[in-house]
Image (spheres, rainbow, N blue to C red):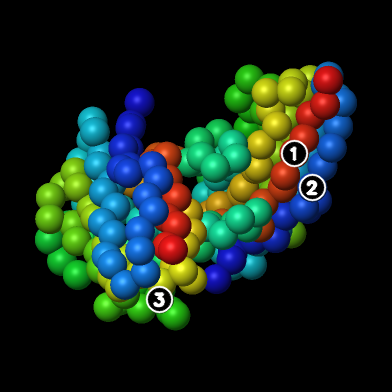
């Protein structure tokens, strides 16, 4: 079945630095990938839709300059948290779908802790 | 914004019992999906039911969909301790964005 690999699985960084999270579709091409954020014991909130070869579409309230998304190829999307602050600490998850109207495959998530 | 509300927020049962989780959504959907998330991990797709379907089975899972009431239910039969996880309903509307319900935390005790 479809596999989405997300890396790193956890990262600790200092306040003010930037962190890049990678999301790869291993055995299928994904023109669209999605980035979510999840706080403890809460649901997933969609942050943005990553579109291969074009600009990402951000959800209302998500700072595009803070969360930079690049989808340079059909198998790779990256999320860069710029100038991270402690309030950016969260669980970030990406997903992609092999076909429309099929279930989505999720990466294993990245636990970001900003100290 | 969240598409759905799930009920109950938390459910604790004994191994062997059935677990039922309900999901209500707000707007029209193309399909409704259920996902499972173990603590601190990614999500696993369990089952998808299309808007023109009313019931679907997969192993110990049974999903129903009532589009007139904008609601869905997930039944896990003969639960096991390994079923302990959070369960989310999610749906796509006219586009391909998947939005999630609030989730149900299921605990299955031995």
The label shown at residue B106 is 1
- Give the spatial CA distance, label 2 vs label 3: 29 Å
Crowd band around label 2 with a 10 angstrom C-alpha radius: few (<14), some (14–19), many (20+): some
The image quarter in which residue A99 lies: top left
Q: Determine the chain carrying the residue at label 3.
A: A
Q: Is residue A101 visible to us here? A: no
The image quarter in which residue A112 lies: bottom left
Q: Quadrant of the N terminus of chain A?
A: top left
**Residue A85, image x and y in percent?**
41, 72
The answer to whether tags 2 and 1 share a subunit is: yes
- Residue bearing mark 3: A62
Crowd band around label 1 with a 10 angstrom C-alpha radius: few (<14), some (14–19), many (20+): many
Secondary structure under tag 1 reads: strand
Q: In screen coordinates, is B56 left or right of A99?
A: right
**Residue B78, image x and y in percent?**
79, 20
Q: In screen coordinates, is B67 left or right of A73?
A: right
Q: Residue at x 75, y 39 (%)?
A: B106
Secondary structure under tag 3 reads: loop
Secondary structure under tag 2 reads: strand
The label shown at residue A64 is none
The label shown at residue B10 is 2
- Give the mark, 2 or 1, whose residue is nearer the N terminus: 2
Q: Do the residues labelled 2 and 1 touch (CB within 8 Å)?
A: yes
Please determine whether, in this image, residue A57 is positioned above or below residue B78.
below
Q: In screen coordinates, is A114 left or right of B2?
A: left
- Give the spatial CA distance, label 2 vs label 1: 6 Å
The image quarter in which residue A66 lies: bottom left
Viewer-nearest residue: B25 or A11: A11
């Amino acid at each position: 079945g479809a596999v989405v690999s997300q890396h790193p699985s956890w990262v600790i960084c200092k306040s003010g630095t930037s962190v890049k999270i990678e999301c790869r579709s291993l055995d299928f091409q994904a023109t669209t990938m999605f980035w979510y954020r999840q706080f403890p014991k809460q649901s997933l909130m969609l942050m943005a839709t990553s579109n291969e070869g074009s600009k990402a579409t951000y959800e209302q309230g998500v700072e595009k300059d803070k969360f930079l998304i690049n989808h340079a190829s059909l198998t790779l999307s990256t999320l860069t948290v710029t100038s991270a602050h402690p309030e950016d600490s969260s669980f970030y998850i990406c997903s992609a779908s092999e076909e429309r109207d099929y279930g989505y495959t999720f990466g294993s998530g990245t636990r970001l802790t900003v100290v | 914004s969240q598409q759905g509300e799930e009920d109950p927020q938390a459910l604790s049962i004994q191994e062997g019992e059935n677990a039922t989780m309900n999901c209500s959504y707000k707007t029209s959907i193309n399909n409704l999906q259920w996902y499972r998330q173990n603590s601190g991990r990614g999500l696993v797709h369990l089952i998808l039911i299309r808007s023109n379907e009313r019931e679907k089975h997969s192993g110990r899972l049974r999903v129903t969909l009532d589009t007139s009431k904008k609601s869905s239910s997930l039944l896990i039969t003969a639960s096991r301790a390994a079923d302990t996880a959070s369960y989310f309903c999610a749906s796509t509307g006219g586009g391909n964005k998947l939005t999630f319900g609030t989730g149900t935390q299921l605990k299955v005790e031995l």
